[in-house]
Amino acid sequence: QVQLQESGPGLVKPSDTLSLTCDVSSYSINTNNYWGWIRQSPGKGLEWIGYLTYSGGAYYNPSLEGRATMSLEKSNNQFSLKLSSVSAVDTAFYYCARWHHTNAFDLWGQGTLVTVSS
Amino acid sequence: EIVLTQSPGTLSLSPGERATLSCRASQSVSSDYLTWYQQKPGRAPRLLIYGASSRPTGIPHRFSGSGSGTDFTLTISRLEPEDFALYYCLQAVSSPLTFGGGTKVEIK
């Protein structure tokens, strides 16, 4: 059974860099899929952060103004997200997900809450 | 950026009733790139419908999607207790990918 699991610090200071990893089990990330990140501020809707192609190319939401960087870690079957210069508005649940060839996020991690606070 | 407007914001219905959720796009969206998700409190979203009308394996037949262009609909034919949740549409025809604001289906 394919599973995705996010990990990373739950608390980040303002102006620091948020770093999260998504561990993928029972499925190789080195296949013809994209791998994405989505976030959800507490009590709010969903926001697409971006996604990575299996070859390492990336597409980002312009609303993040160049602060997001995603990368594949094929040796560990993981992919990661870094978000720089965070502020309180970046406090959210962060989800990693698989982008399927049916043009859908078909598998999601359980999500991890990241709070930006001093 | 394509804006998706979901209506109503909240739908109050009883188990066994039919739910009709709307997702309207600010520009035309190819059906191939319109999906629906269900989210329960404290849980990650779950894919319900892809390609505007196709159900992934394991999704009950009471969930159906339809529509084209700028107007899409998710229908739950007969609400089961486990269907009371939040529902989101997503378009992926152009970047940035955007979600609708969601419709909450609550027990009346």
Image (cartoon, rainbow, N blue to C red):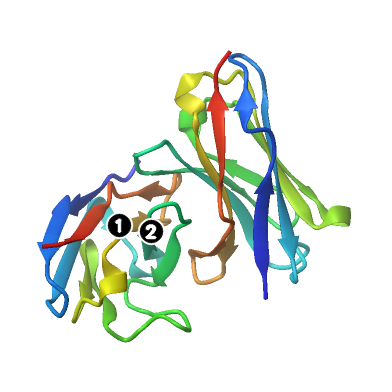
Quarter where residue A44 is shown: top left
Label 2 in the same subunit as label 1: yes
**In the rendered image, which quarter contains the C terminus of chain A?**
top right
Q: Earlier in the sequence, mark 2 or mark 1?
A: 2
Residue with the mark numbered 1: B86
SS at circle 2 = strand
* Residue drawn at 66 percent across, 49 percent down: A6
Q: Looking at the picture, does residue A28 appear above or below residue B44?
A: below
Subunit bearing disc 1: B
* Residue drawn at 65 percent across, 45 percent down: A58
x then y, percent, for residue B3: 28, 44
Residue A68 relative to residue A106: left or right: right
Residue with the mark numbered 2: B39
| Pointer 1 local density, CA inside 10 Å: few below 14, some 14–19, many at least 20 | many
Observer-nearest of A27 and B23: A27
Residue A109 relative to residue A19: left or right: left
- Circle count: 2
SS at circle 1 = strand
x then y, percent, for residue A90: 50, 27
Q: Looking at the picture, does residue B27 appear above or below residue A116?
A: below
| Pointer 2 local density, CA inside 10 Å: few below 14, some 14–19, many at least 20 | some
Amino acid type assigned to the residue bearing label 2 in the image: Gln
Q: Looking at the picture, does residue A51 appear above or below residue A88?
A: below
* Residue drawn at 11 percent across, 60 percent down: B12
x then y, percent, for residue B53: 32, 77
x then y, percent, for residue B27: 25, 51
Callout 2 touching callout 1 (CB < 8 Å): yes
Alpha carbon distance from label 2 to label 1: 5 Å
Amino acid type assigned to the residue bearing label 1 in the image: Leu
Observer-nearest of B8 and B5: B8
Q: Residue furthest bottom?
A: B61
Subunit bearing disc 2: B
